[in-house]
Image (cartoon, rainbow, N blue to C red):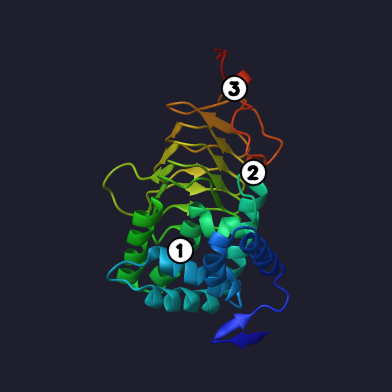
Amino acid sequence: MGSENGCTMEENDELWEQLRYEAKCDADAELALASYLYATILVHRTMEQALAFHLGNKLSSSTLSNTLLYNLVVDVFMEDPEIRDAIRIDMRAVREKDPACVSYCHCMLNFKGFLACQAHRVAHRLWSQGRIPLALAIQSRISEVFAMDIHPAAKIGKGVLFDHGTGIVIGETASIGNNVSILHHVTLGGTGKQGGDRHPKIGNGVLIGAGATILGNIKIGEGAKIGAGAVVLIDVPPRTTAVGNPARLVGGRRNPTQLTETPSETMDHTSFISEWSDYVI
């Protein structure tokens, strides 16, 4: 390990080297973006510096400077190796799962679900340190800039894909496991005004389709699939599919159809249709 301007240097950061190579190719191919790519990626020595710079510019406002945010974000990144690891695992997840993601460079610069997730990791660490007003200020900026409202106390694992991202709401006591894929306009919410532990717990490998609403302190089991537009109010067993409003298990409650693959990796949103109904056009 070496250091530059207080930032730890990863000696063999292959993902960062690939991202820099992609940025250089894009700068050569599109001169209109050359200065932007240089300032945002190529001038920086580490992925953490580049991401902190980009998030600082994205989240800044007339009263919250990009320089202040850059220093804050890069400090949090360099204090926490788990966050640094999560950044890379998240980026690989986006690149591998989303066919619209053409490169790691594209993910880092343009995928707001990825950017919002990394900004949330900063807010969550600040919340855990008792820096509540600052964590809430960052949450507010994430909501305004990326149209995603994630409470800074919510716990999010690694390898998470927020696909499109717009309209995602994640409540204070919600938790999301590793290798989870969540589409736009998903709500992980409470059921009323009561306090305490009141939000969903999402297991590893879960896929949640667009517009799904999951309410209350319930568990979505590992490897489960929640269909688009579903309203889920009770636990969903592992490796099953819940669809509809109110949600029902494909195959029935007593003998639900078991998924043989991890839905967050296959990103298959429609394979249950033939078993669930005779829907035709």
| Numbered badge on residue 119 | 1
Q: CA distance from mark 1 to mark 2?
A: 23 Å
Q: Nearer the viewer, residue 206 or 85?
A: 85
Density class for disc 1 (Cα within 10 Å; few <14, some 14-19, many ≥20) is many
Density class for disc 2 (Cα within 10 Å; few <14, some 14-19, many ≥20) is few
Residue 104 appears left or right of 53: right
| Numbered badge on residue 273 | 3
Q: Amino acid at mark 2?
A: Pro
The residue sitting at 52% across, 74% down in the picture is 77
Q: Secondary structure at mark 2?
A: loop
Asked if the residue under mark 3 is in contact with the one under mark 1, i.e. CB atoms within 8 Å, the reply is no
Task: Name the front one of labels 2 and 3.
Answer: 2
Residue 197 visible to the viewer: yes
| Numbered badge on residue 99 | 2
Compared to 56, does 175 lie above or below? above
Residue 214, x across and y down, in percent: 43, 40
Q: Earlier in the sequence, mark 1 or mark 2?
A: 2
Task: Quarter of the image for the N terminus: give it.
Answer: bottom right
Q: Nearer the viewer, residue 23 or 192?
A: 23
The residue sitting at 61% across, 60% down in the picture is 105
Q: Nearer the viewer, residue 80 or 164?
A: 164
In the rendered image, the residue lying farthest to the front is: 31
Compared to 86, does 148 lie above or below? above
Q: Secondary structure at mark 1?
A: helix
Residue 223, x across and y down, in percent: 62, 42
The residue sitting at 38% across, 58% down in the picture is 142
Residue 90 visible to the viewer: no
Task: Name the front one of labels 1 and 2.
Answer: 2
Q: Amino acid at mark 3?
A: Ile
Compared to 278, does 68 lie above or below? below
